[in-house]
Amino acid sequence: MAAGAAAGGAAAGGPGEVGLEEPKKMTREDWRKKKELEEQRKLGNAPAEVDEEGKDINPHIPQYISSVPWYIDPSKRPTLKHQRPQPEKQKQYSSSGDWYKRGVQEHAVATRYRKGACENCGALTHKKKDCMERPRKVGAKYTGMNIAPDEHVQPELMFDYDGKRDRWNGYNPEEHMKIVEEYAKVDLAKRTLKAQKLQEELASGKLEQVERDRNSEDEDEDKYADDIDMPGQNFDSKRRITVRNLRIREDIAKYLRNLDPNSAYYDPKTRAMRENPYANTGKNPDEVGYAGDNFVRYTGDTISMAQTQLFAWEAYDKGSEVHLQADPTKLELLYKSFKVKKEDFKAQQKESILEKYGGQEHLDTPPAELLLAQTEDYVEYSRHGTVIKGQEKAIACSKYEEDVKINNHTCIWGSYWKDGKWGYKCCHSFVKYSYCTGEAGKEIANTEASLLEEQPREEEHVTKPKTLMEIHQEKQKEKKKKKHKKSSNSDSEGEEKKKQEKLKKALNAEEARLLQVKEIMQLDERKRPYNSVYETREPTEEEMEAYRMKRQRPDDPMASFLGQ
């Protein structure tokens, strides 16, 4: 009992101590109601729970975040105050308008030395070791004269991340008005001088009215910057226009010259396009306005200049006093003589080796590409078939001579065809290896063709008289023809009967074939005989006619009455 009382007294504690009693256990009904209320709050049918500050608590927040532990304060309601920034821990930053004061205090000027001030100048805001004035022979502490004004006491400013990086913090916009006023005065002075100069020229009679109108439009450099020679290259102190960053309107951006995604790569960071954007279009790099940065870099005498500079460095290392900028003529002559001597030395070395060891016949052999009909040249193609890297494969030529024009012909043999004969198109000649006659040959060929057409007509009009023998022979031929026609008529009737009989047999065979095909098609594919519907024999004319007569057409309106 005593131990229990002691424990109870310890639990009860004093009035200022927090009780450590555990909360009472909830009944099953209270627990069910609590869970139903939470579900209704999550669905939005019930109002959200409110914390001690009157703010709504999100019902989806877990209980272990919103509830206060029982061992700290069991009577406290759920809250999210501990999740928010605590005001006592927040740093107080200076506002964006605050800045350090410059200059000195103008209103207060001391007339005598004050205790604790600078011994050199007499200002209260700094000591002698921090004084920025020239050291006096006798300081203001002892003379009491020329006391310097006090500087502003600088505040201790504390900025946040953005405030520390604000470039315009502390800038006074009124200072820019001084620059604007200065430029306005310069502009006014320029205009007055220009007006005076024009009046003097008019008074002297040197300037005409036409020239005045033209100069008033062209010489206004305050409005136009198109007459400047080259942007970024011309510099004139009299001009007030900055043209270094201007670009010509006719210039096209590098990435807009070829919109093909497989064309030259454009680097947006450095604004460089090293390759030629018109590489796959078939245009000559010398004809286009822009052919890539590398084309400009390696055109003209750039490569030869680099080789000359390299030769100058190597010659200087070996003891020759040459320099590209100091003595370019001497270096050029020395480089030319060096190249000639180098070639002669290589030729002599090659000849001496061949004389000593031989092997000239191996040097005269054709290249390995012709011997083996294959090379190790790397060629890379794009998805469209164009060559990206390497040399494109040459088109295979025929072993026969092509486009060979001989004997003054402008067209090849076989370029003209008429009446089953080949010829030359340039002269309409049908004789191979003949000499070209040009337009004259065409006229002669046309006249010959017209004469050949007229000859049969003339022969029709001019008929020779027939003899009695010829007339008798013609009558005998006509009698024979009549007899032949009668016999042929009888023969044709017999042939027609045979054809009809053959056609009836073919029709019967076609009907039997169709029935057989119908029976086979009703069977399962796995049970059908092999090649049951296939024959290698060529059909006869009667079988083809029977097939056409028995064939059913789905678009025929009488197709349904064929079997009746």
Image (cartoon, helix red, strand yellow):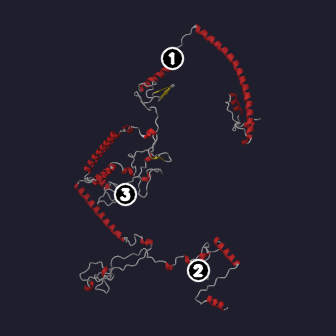
Q: Is residue 270 something one can see in this rendering?
A: yes
Q: What residue sits right under mark 1 in the picture?
A: 458
> Is the residue 560 above or below the residue 466 in the image?
below
Give residue 470's position: percent from left, percent from top: 58, 9
Q: Quadrant of the N terminus?
A: bottom right
In this rendering, is residue 548 above or below 453?
A: below
Q: What is the secondary structure assignment of the residue under circle 3?
A: loop
Residue sitting at the far right: 564
The residue where tag 3 is placed is 246
Taking the spot 65% from the left edge, 90% from the top edge, the residue there is 3
Which dot, 1 or 3, sits closer to the camera? 3
Q: Nearer the viewer, residue 289 or 202?
A: 289
Give the CA distance from mark 1 to mark 2: 131 Å
Q: Which badge, 1 or 3, comes first in the chain's sequence? A: 3
Which numbered disc, 2 or 3, marks the residue that appears first in the sequence?
A: 2
Please state the horizontal and vertical placement of residue 447, each as a whole percent of the image. Answer: 45, 22
Upstream in sequence: badge 1 or badge 2: 2
Q: Residue furthest left?
A: 204
Going 36% across and 50% down the picture, which residue do you hit?
298
Q: Are there few (<14), some (14-19), or many (20+) residues within 10 Å of tag 3? A: few
Horizontal and vertical percent for residue 405?
42, 30
Residue 508 location in percent, x, y?
A: 75, 30
